[in-house]
Image (cartoon, helix red, strand yellow):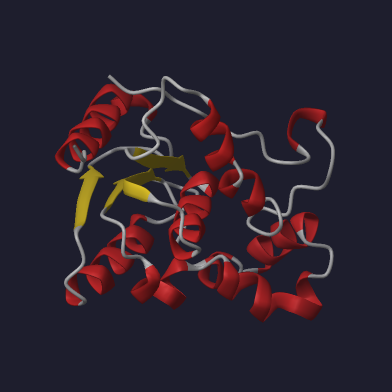
């Protein structure tokens, strides 16, 4: 009962531009709105966001910047880039994505860390995570969920014991959780 529209981020798969992983490429997600409105068979009043890992971070930023989603779901999403880049291995990874990381570390991490601006996440959120995620600790989603719950926000949490980063062995349950969450937030 849902249509899926997935924007192509600049620089992906040989496309034009440079992928900034949460920089100017956020516009590629935000600019999907006019496309959705042009497709007459889609209900532009019932938009939802669904993101994995980096895509989850993009979901958080889109909500922060006013994307008119009725609800959103993420899995394996990082919520604190500062924590991920606090090790030398994490900082080395960051330098590959952002060559100016050492000079702009604070700006880069705060822009991409939902935990730093949780109060701006007003859209209902379902945060899903694998307890055995080796790329992003489940504690990142749990900390954000705690902040949102303290602020009285509509937040759900689904942590899978033994689940990996993409919840790949649990993808049917993961997607069912997201669809059920979205259905609870459908407008008329």
The residue at 81%/47% (across/down) is 18
Res 130 visible: no
Using the rendered view, name the quadrant where residue 108 is placed: bottom right
The residue at 36%/34% (across/down) is 167
**Residue placed most toward the observer, 56 or 135:** 56
Instruction: Please give left or right for residue 37 compared with residue 98 in the image.
Output: left
Residue 55 x, y percent position in the rendering:
52, 45
The residue at 21%/46% (across/down) is 158
The residue at 33%/62% (across/down) is 139
**Residue placed most toward the observer, 143 or 155:** 155
Res 149 visible: yes
Instruction: Please give left or right for residue 57 compared with residue 119 in the image.
Output: right
Q: Looking at the picture, does residue 91 appear above or below residue 46?
A: below
Q: Quadrant of the C terminus?
A: top left
Residue 42 x, y percent position in the rendering:
41, 25
Q: Quadrant of the N terminus?
A: top left
Residue 147 x, y percent position in the rendering:
27, 73
Count of numbered circles in the view: 0
**Residue placed most toward the observer, 45 or 155:** 45
Residue 15 x, y percent position in the rendering:
81, 32
Q: Looking at the picture, does residue 50 appear above or below residue 104?
A: above
**Residue placed most toward the observer, 8 or 32:** 32
Using the rendered view, name the quadrant where residue 143 is placed: bottom left
Q: Looking at the picture, does residue 43 appear above or below residue 48?
A: above
């Amino acid at each position: 009962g849902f249509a899926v529209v997935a924007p192509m981020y600049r620089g992906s798969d040989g496309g034009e531009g440079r992928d900034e992983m949460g920089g100017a490429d956020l516009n590629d997600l935000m600019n999907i709105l006019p496309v959705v409105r042009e497709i007459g068979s889609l209900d532009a009043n019932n938009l939802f966001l669904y993101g994995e890992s980096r895509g989850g971070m993009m979901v958080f930023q889109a909500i922060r910047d006013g994307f008119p989603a009725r609800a959103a779901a993420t899995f394996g999403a990082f919520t604190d880039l500062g924590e991920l880049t606090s090790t030398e291995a994490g900082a080395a990874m960051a330098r590959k994505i952002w060559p100016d990381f050492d000079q702009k570390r604070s700006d880069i991490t705060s822009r991409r860390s939902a935990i730093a601006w949780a109060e701006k996440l007003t859209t209902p959120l379902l945060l899903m995570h694998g307890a055995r995620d080796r790329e992003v600790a489940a504690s990142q989603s749990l900390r954000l969920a705690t902040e949102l719950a303290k602020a009285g926000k509509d937040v759900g949490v689904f942590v899978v014991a033994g689940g990996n980063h993409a919840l790949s062995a649990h993808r049917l349950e993961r997607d069912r959780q997201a669809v059920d969450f979205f259905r609870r937030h459908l407008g008329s």
